[in-house]
Amino acid sequence: MKTNKFLQLLSEGEFKDADLILESMTTTTTTTTHLRAALLLKQNMVEECMELLISEGNDCQSALMRAQILIDMNDFQGAIKIIESIAQIKNFPAQVATLVALYNKNNQAEEANALLNSANGGLDPLTRARLLTAKGESERASERKF
């Protein structure tokens, strides 16, 4: 219930009240850290937010939050490094798709193609076809070699 109130105050720009709610919450440390990070972002305190998330270690959610912040700042190479370092999602189709999109945004088409072609990419033909079709490739994309 307090989380909902916190999020409502956050969306309304009531940062002091949101901070008070956060202080009174008895959730896990990780949850509190992520909510505090959201509060810092809403206050445009990006550096402080990143430091807080880094202090949390390399848990999957904190790392993904850091990567999203870097993407929002157009730091695609930084986001790529973080996403590549998250062991919990290594070679999952969503991770591969995200990396391919980031490589393409960062003008690294060779890296994107190498990832799509790698045995470690873990892509089944249907996933590969969807990724390539999203890039504007042909319907027979799953069979295509680069």
Image: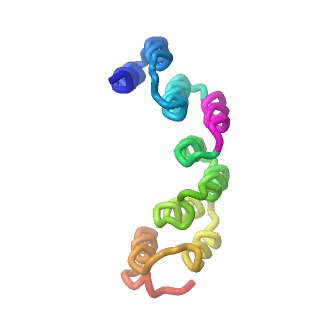
Instruction: Give me the residue at 45% from left, 75% from top.
Output: 128
Task: Please tell me whether residue 52 belongs to the stretch shown in magenta.
Answer: yes
Instruction: Give me the residue at 64% from left, 28% from top.
Output: 48
Instruction: Give me the residue at 42% from left, 73% from top.
Output: 127
Task: Please tell me whether residue 84 belongs to the stretch shown in magenta.
Answer: no
- Height in image: 10 above or below 132? above
Side (left or right) of 10 relative to 116: left
Q: Can residue 15 be seen in this view?
A: no
Instruction: Give me the residue at 57% from left, 84% from top.
Output: 146
Q: Give the range drawn in magenta.
A: 46-57
Side (left or right) of 89 relative to 11: right
- Height in image: 1 above or below 56? above
Give the image location of residue 135, x and y in percent.
46, 69
Give the image location of residue 14, x and y in percent.
43, 15
The scheme the figure's colours follow is rainbow
Give the image location of residue 52, x and y in percent.
63, 31
Image quadrant occupied by the N terminus: top left
Give whichever of 121, 59 is nearer the camera: 59
The answer to which quarter of the image holds residue 125 is: bottom left
Q: Can residue 13 be seen in this view?
A: yes
